[in-house]
Amino acid sequence: MPHSAEDKQRAITRLRRIRGQAEALERAVEAGSDCAPILQQLAAMRGAVHGLMADLLDSHVRETLMAQPSAAPQALDETLTLLRSYLK
């Protein structure tokens, strides 16, 4: 969960964009649009969700690991890099 007001607003903005994409996708399906544009929109939504998830995970891991005195910044960066590769 983002903790600063700026991070929260950024997350809300991204969620609203994702909601807009979902609503556009619903309208396209209802209208009987071709599959290619629908698949492209689905891929865009997936990318948006994964991006938001990566940012939230990044924030959570940084807050959690940095609260522990034994966590080395290099280990933290390596963990985040690994996690981001799995979220793509």
Image (cartoon, rainbow, N blue to C red):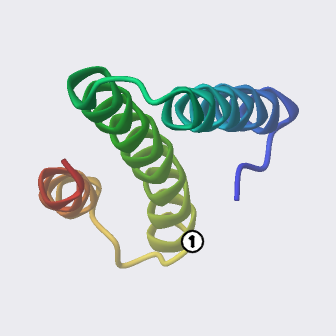
* Depicted 6 relative to depicted 73: above or below: above
* Depicted 75 relative to depicted 74: above or below: below
* Depicted 78 relative to depicted 49: above or below: below
Indicate the position of residue 11 as horizontal and vertical percent values.
Answer: 69, 37
* Depicted 18 relative to depicted 70: above or below: above
* Residue type (three-letter) at the residue carrying disc 1: Ala
Residue at left offset 67%, top offset 33%? 23
Give the SS element for disc 1: loop
Residue at left offset 79%, top offset 39%? 8
Closest to the observer: 45 or 4?
45
Task: Identify residue for label 1.
Answer: 67
Occupied quadrant, residue 36 = top left
Q: Quadrant of the N terminus?
A: bottom right
Indicate the position of residue 59 as horizontal and vertical percent values.
Answer: 53, 52
Occupied quadrant, residue 87 = bottom left
Indicate the position of residue 71 as horizontal and vertical percent values.
Answer: 34, 72
Indicate the position of residue 81 as horizontal and vertical percent values.
Answer: 16, 50
Horizontal side, residue 59 vs residue 65: left or right: right
**Figure label count:** 1
Horizontal side, residue 56 vs residue 17: left or right: left
Horizontal side, residue 10 vs residue 47: left or right: right
Occupied quadrant, residue 75 = bottom left
Q: Residue furthest front?
A: 32
Closest to the observer: 86 or 31?
31
Residue at left offset 53%, top offset 72%? 64
Around disc 1, counting alpha carbons within 10 Å, would you say few (fewer than 14), some (14 to 19), or many (20 or more)?
few
